[in-house]
Amino acid sequence: MRASGPFKAFRVLALVVVVLGLVAPLLWMVAASFKTNVDIYDSSKAVLFDPTTANYGKVFQQANYLKFIVNSFWVAFASTALSLVLGVPAAYSMARFGMRRSALVVLMARVIPGVSLLVPWYYVFSNLRMVGGYGVLILSHMFVALPLIVYIMMGYFEGLPEELEESGLVDGLTPIGAFRRITLPLSTPGIATAAILSFIFSWNNFMFALVLSGGSTKTLPVAIFDFVGYASIDWGGLMAASTIVTLPIMLVALFAQKYVVSGLTAGATKG
């Protein structure tokens, strides 16, 4: 049954309102990154203004944001890769052997607030002389990325028919060989989904990096705070830095949207 005219018009209007509500802050952020601080405070220049690239020059030249971009990418990539190496086999074992209690213990990390762990982590890692290095950032990001990957991949593996692996065993494969040659290739959409979401979390993480990073390992979300002073805020530089942080994630979400949708829905049905 097709939707009636008034309902269709209401649905279109509702979609427009929602999209504008989501996109308007992003558009304002991008526009403000090309304004001077004076123009940002001037409401008459909200739409029409003389654009300037001085804020981006300040970000890349004076603030050395290229170093922070490399730091964020390295921490996000390493934490995601290590979480996949550990989380995918763990999720497969828990799904195939009914390890519900073990899975519950792992997934409890998704419930524990990260802020409650900062003081113990700082105490432990400072005694190990790891605070300020890449290793402590990677490990702290894995604390959330690993349970997320296990949660996603468990549902995906439970949706794959066990008969495929059994046929591989009949043909002479070992259980590990069946997992590597049959199950793992079929679970590519789920792995892509878990990797994308884990990378986005690590890239956007602020709390862990604020406490555990150092001057040379500072990531982008923490580096943005350099534009916030005690007496004033450099809104132009802040908006330019925020645009640089947001742009890679928007591109990843745009081009990887189909993998995220297929990966999250693949484990919804079995058989």
Image (tube, rainbow, N blue to C red):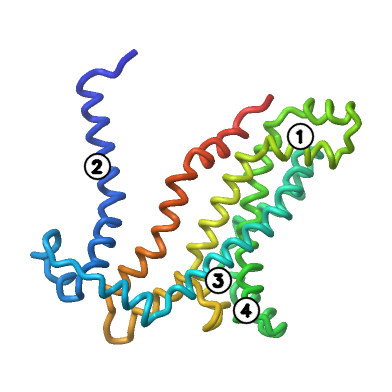
Eyeballing the image, is 144 above or below 190?
below
Q: What residue type is disc 1 on? A: Ile
Residue displayed at 24% across by 42% down? 17
Q: Nearer the viewer, mark 1 or mark 4?
A: 1
Eyeballing the image, is 200 above or below 1?
below
Q: Check residue 133 in the rendering and tell me which mark sits there, or answer none.
A: 4
Q: Say few, some or many: other residues with alpha carbon within 10 Å of mark 2 (under 14 / 14 to 19 / 20 or more).
A: few
Question: What residue does disc 3 label?
Answer: 208
Q: Earlier in the sequence, mark 3 or mark 1?
A: 1
Disc 3 on helix, strand or loop?
A: helix
Q: CA distance from mark 1 to mark 4?
A: 39 Å
Q: Say few, some or many: other residues with alpha carbon within 10 Å of mark 1 (under 14 / 14 to 19 / 20 or more).
A: some
Whether tag 3 and tag 2 are in contact, CB under 8 A, the answer is no
Which x, y percent locates residue 12?
25, 32
Question: What residue does disc 2 label?
Answer: 17
Eyeballing the image, is 206 above or below 25?
below
Q: Earlier in the sequence, mark 2 or mark 4?
A: 2
- In this rendering, position of residue 95 left or right of residue 149: right
Disc 2 on helix, strand or loop?
A: helix
Residue displayed at 60% across by 64% down? 141
Whether tag 1 and tag 2 are in contact, CB under 8 A, the answer is no
Residue displayed at 67% across by 38% down? 187
Q: What residue type is disc 4 on? A: Gly
Disc 4 on helix, strand or loop?
A: loop
Viewport quadrant of the N terminus:
top left
- In this rendering, position of residue 252 left or right of residue 118: left
- In this rendering, position of residue 221 left or right of residue 49: right
Question: What residue does disc 1 label?
Answer: 182
| 108 vs 27, nearest the viewer | 27
Q: Nearer the viewer, mark 1 or mark 2?
A: 1
Outermost residue, left side: 44
Q: Earlier in the sequence, mark 1 or mark 4?
A: 4
